[in-house]
Amino acid sequence: MNIITLRCSQPTDANSLPAIERSAAALFRADPELAWLADAPVTDARQHLHAIESADVWVAQSADGALAGFLGAIEVDNQLHIQELSVSQHFQGQGIGRKLLLTAIECSRKRELNGLTLTTFRDLRWNEPFYQRLGIKTLSHAYLTHV
């Protein structure tokens, strides 16, 4: 297992983040209905740089300096909203996504925000349950239509 450290992203990381996002998206090939996402455009380096400069972006870095994953979030309506959580395939299954998400949750708590939000696919066996194990609750369709 690789030793992984988490840190705030730096502008020099921006060029590495699209490849991480592309690698992570390859997991969608496992679902015939969502396989198209594996080849869909990802956020480009310029947009990642803007996020690093204006939002919250954390990266997971291996001992050899390789970036393994990242989480990007913005504050919306006194909540921290996760825009992207990606871990390169080579590093998946090592708890990196969980560590990144726990970092965002802790950030939300320290800022005394009202909560943390994200959108995800409910029907993927590896997606919604991951978030639920960390205490994130799925909102019902009825709740969403009345907000």
Image: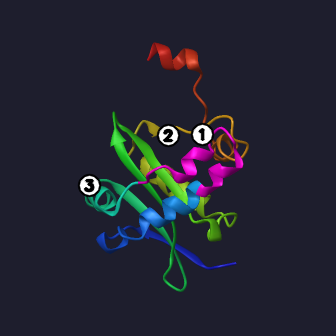
Q: Secondary structure at mark 1?
A: loop
Q: Amino acid at mark 3?
A: Ser
Q: Is residue 32 magenta?
A: yes
Say whether marks 1 and 2 touch (CB < 8 Å).
yes
Distance (Cα) linking label 2 and label 3: 18 Å
Q: Secondary structure at mark 2?
A: loop
Density class for disc 2 (Cα within 10 Å; few <14, some 14-19, many ≥20) is some
The residue where tag 3 is placed is 54
Which percent across, then down, holds residue 1? 70, 78
Q: Secondary structure at mark 3?
A: helix
Marked residue nearer the N-terminal end (1 or 3): 3
Task: Tell how many labels.
Answer: 3
> What numbered label is drawn on residue 118?
2
The magenta stretch spans which residues?
A: 26-42
Say whether marks 1 and 3 touch (CB < 8 Å).
no
Distance (Cα) linking label 1 and label 2: 9 Å
The residue where tag 1 is placed is 136
Side of 29 where 66 appears, left or right = left
Which percent across, then down, holds residue 47? 30, 56
Residue 69 against residue 62 in the figure, above or below: above
Density class for disc 3 (Cα within 10 Å; few <14, some 14-19, many ≥20) is few
> What numbered label is drawn on residue 63?
none
User: Could you say which is closer to the camera, residue 67 or residue 19?
Assistant: 19
Q: Name the residue located 35 percent from the left edge and 46 percent from the top edge.
A: 74
Q: Name the residue located 39 percent from the left edge and 54 percent from the top edge.
A: 43
